[in-house]
Image: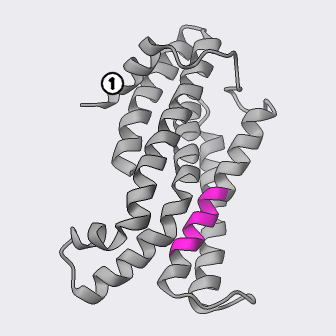
């Protein structure tokens, strides 16, 4: 998923930066929305196999059988949260391309603090949370990315970011092709 999202957001970064530099805020916002949609589609496409084929995916790594079983649990627990990760990734890339590096950094810090809290709590059964071991680590990471994604989306919808929701029409075929063509290589 990360490699596919990097491909999409490479195009996002290039096209948002180009539009932003040219003073075309509306195009930067349309590219951001198109990228957000593409990343969500990619996340959905990857989440389903990760959810149902987690053991096969973990086996590709050629680990010890016990480690494959643990990796499969982690993959399966994290799979439902991939859309949140994609939202986080897409909006963060677009903001950095528009020159706002602080907001993605701050949201990333928040995400990490939430992750550390929930990993400790869910892996070891602290803070009144159940002890879930490896499954807790996957769920904790998912919760953390969900918190970051929710904060980013709320800031975006409320107009508190350099890039806003912007005008309709992000799905122009040429725009989507450019986003994908830049990241494809």
Compared to residue 31, the image places residue 70 above or below, namely below
Predominant secondary structure in magenta? helix
Front-lying residue, 115 or 139: 139
Q: Is residue 131 left or right of residue 93?
A: right
Q: Residue at x 60, y 44 (%)?
A: 104
Q: Residue furthest front?
A: 52
- Would you identify the image quadrant in which residue 98 lies? top right
Q: Tag 1's secondary structure?
A: helix
Q: Could you tell me residue 45's position as x and y percent?
A: 42, 47
Give the quarter of the figure containing the C terminus. Answer: top left
The magenta-colored residue range is: 138-146
Of residues 117 and 68, the one drawn nearer to the viewer in this rendering = 68
Q: Residue at x 55, y 50 (%)?
A: 83
Which residue is at a point 70% across and 41% down the rendered structure image? 153
Q: Determine if residue 126 is in view.
A: yes
For the point 52% across and 21% down, which residue is it?
Answer: 16
Q: How many marks?
A: 1
Residue 41 at x, y percent in the picture: 48, 40
Q: Quadrant of residue 71?
A: bottom left
Q: Is residue 98 visible?
A: no
Residue lying farthest left?
62
Asked if residue 61 is positioned above or below residue 156 in the image, the reply reads: below
Look at the image and say whether residue 119 sits in the magenta stretch: no
- Picture colour scheme: one colour
**Residue wearing tag 1:** 182
- On screen, 103 above or below 81? above
The answer to if 139 sits in the magenta stretch is yes
Q: Where is residue 155 drawn, in percent x and y?
A: 76, 39
Q: How many residues crowd around disc 1 within 10 Å: few (fewer than 14), some, or many (20 or more)?
A: some
């Amino acid at each position: 998923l990360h490699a596919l999202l990097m491909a999409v957001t490479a195009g996002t970064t290039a096209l948002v930066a180009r539009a932003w530099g040219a003073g075309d805020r509306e195009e930067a916002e349309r590219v951001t929305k198109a990228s957000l949609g593409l990343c969500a589609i990619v996340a959905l496409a990857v989440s389903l196999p990760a959810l149902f084929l987690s053991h096969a995916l973990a086996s590709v790594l050629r680990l010890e059988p016990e480690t494959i079983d643990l990796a499969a649990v982690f993959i399966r627990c994290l799979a439902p949260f991939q859309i949140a990760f994609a939202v986080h990734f897409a909006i963060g890339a677009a903001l950095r391309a528009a020159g706002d590096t602080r907001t993605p950094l701050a949201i990333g810090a928040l995400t990490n603090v939430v992750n550390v809290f929930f990993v400790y709590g869910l892996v070891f059964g602290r803070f009144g949370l159940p002890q879930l071991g490896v499954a807790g680590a996957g769920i904790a990471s998912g919760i953390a990315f969900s918190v970051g994604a929710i904060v980013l989306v709320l800031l975006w919808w409320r107009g508190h970011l350099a890039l806003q929701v912007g005008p309709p029409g992000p799905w122009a075929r040429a725009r989507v092709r450019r986003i994908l063509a830049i990241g494809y290589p």
